[in-house]
Amino acid sequence: MDNKVLKLKEGVTFSKFDDDGQDDMYLIKYQERYWKISVIIYQILLGINGERDFSNLHIHLLEEKQIRINQEQLEQVIDFVCVKNGLLEGTESQSKRKRNKMLWGRITIIPQIFVEKLKIFKFLFFPKVISLTSICVVLWIIYIYLTNSNVMIVNELMSLRFSDVVLCYVFIMIAGIIHEFGHSIATLTNGGEAGKIGVGVYILMPVLYSDVTDAWRLKKNQRILVDFGGMYLQGIFLIICFFINMFFLDNFIIHIAILLSGFQILGNLNPFIKLDGYWVLVDYLGEIEILTVVKKVWMDTLVKLRKKNIKYSGISKNKRIVVYVYSIFTILFYLYFARFFLNTIILAINNFYYDIDFLTHNGVTNVNITLEGLFQYLSNRITSFIVFVFLVRIIWMIAKWFYKNFENNKLVHQK
């Protein structure tokens, strides 16, 4: 590395990462990207102030910060953290922002400029308001869960007319947008920035999502509030609609839609896929990914079994128990999901074969199409379509990975 003056780009900021006091960690933020770093790397980056070259930075770290690092190690840190991520003046990022690859087909429906105006509803997330309304939401969800069956509600939905089903889905969509508003308002209330709201497909499920990445800069309890914020605001909306419908409208269709949306709140507590329950557990454990802490706990356990005098590093007993239980139930969940996914693929193939066989024997001109018939057909085939698109996407990603590795190996042999 030459001795030119090192300077971080404008807009690179640092903040303390609240992980419940387990480790002294920090966050780098640049544009819409975040990196979790150790205190040593944080001190190194603070030394890059636009006045020091590489040699002076090394001396500064050794004499003023008592950080003993040789020049080769320092160069590797600057290259790995700053150069490759485009944080230094005169450099460009060598990788794009990492996104959840299981959430695909994203379409923005509400831009950030509108989401920022939701600040006027911050009062809903003041402590005294939350204390009262949260109790009401929890009691209402318990009530509908004990007095209704999810299977019964779905069967009622399937027996409705086309126009009634559309009304149900419109209501559920509105409740879903209110849910995403909850995440955004909770972020804004605690001083974070809220991004756009959109719709996409999570694995095989059509979902709404909100960009609240900036919540990583918040304290642990504030992040947990953001996680619960969607279910909380959706619950308030549903309770209001429930009583309006009970006392004024008495509309069976709206009643079914409210119950379906209420059961969705319970579904969001699933901690095994990246829904709200997953992020609650992430923030409770003080990590960015659950897989990170699961690896740490099991590696510590294996080391302890071999060397009994070794202590666990940085994970409390209560959190280790949570990770052990979570690991067992995660395995069971993914075994169940694998079976469900396989059955869905088989169903999709059967549907595709049936449609081709039907068209072959009857032709397109002999098919009688009605609006309700078309809706029923599409309702039965939408999952099959998503499965096929998902499989094509996975095959394409695997092919790209093999091609990239093939090209890299070819370049190594050429050198």
Image (spheres, rainbow, N blue to C red):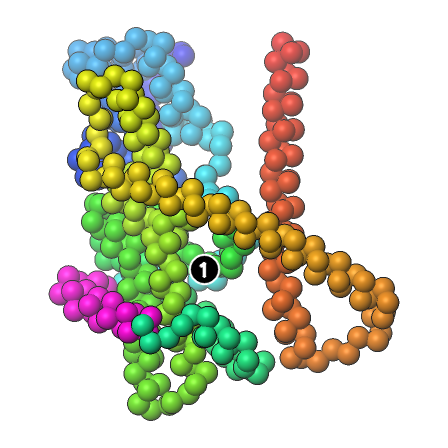
Q: Residues within 10 Å of mark 1 (few under 14, many from 20)?
A: many
> Residue 179 location, x and y as percent?
36, 64
Which residue is disc 1 drawn over?
208
> Residue 110 location, x and y as percent?
44, 62
Residue at left 32%, top 24%? Answer: 302
Give the quarter of the figure containing the N terminus: top left
Query: Could you say whether the residue bearing mark 1 is in a helix, strand or loop?
Result: strand
> Residue 236 location, x and y as percent?
28, 71
Is residue 126 inside the magenta stretch?
yes
Vertical placement of 35 versus 39: above or below? below
Q: Which residue type does callout 1 highlight? A: Leu
> Residue 84 location, x and y as percent?
44, 26
Q: Which SS type dominates the magenta stretch?
A: helix
User: Between residues 81 and 12, which one lies in front from this camera angle?
Assistant: 81
User: Between residues 190 and 235, which one lies in front from this camera angle?
Assistant: 235
Which stretch appears magenta? 122-145
Residue at left 16%, top 69%? Answer: 132
Instruction: Indicate left or right for 18 with 157 as reference.
Output: left
Outermost residue on the left side: it is 128
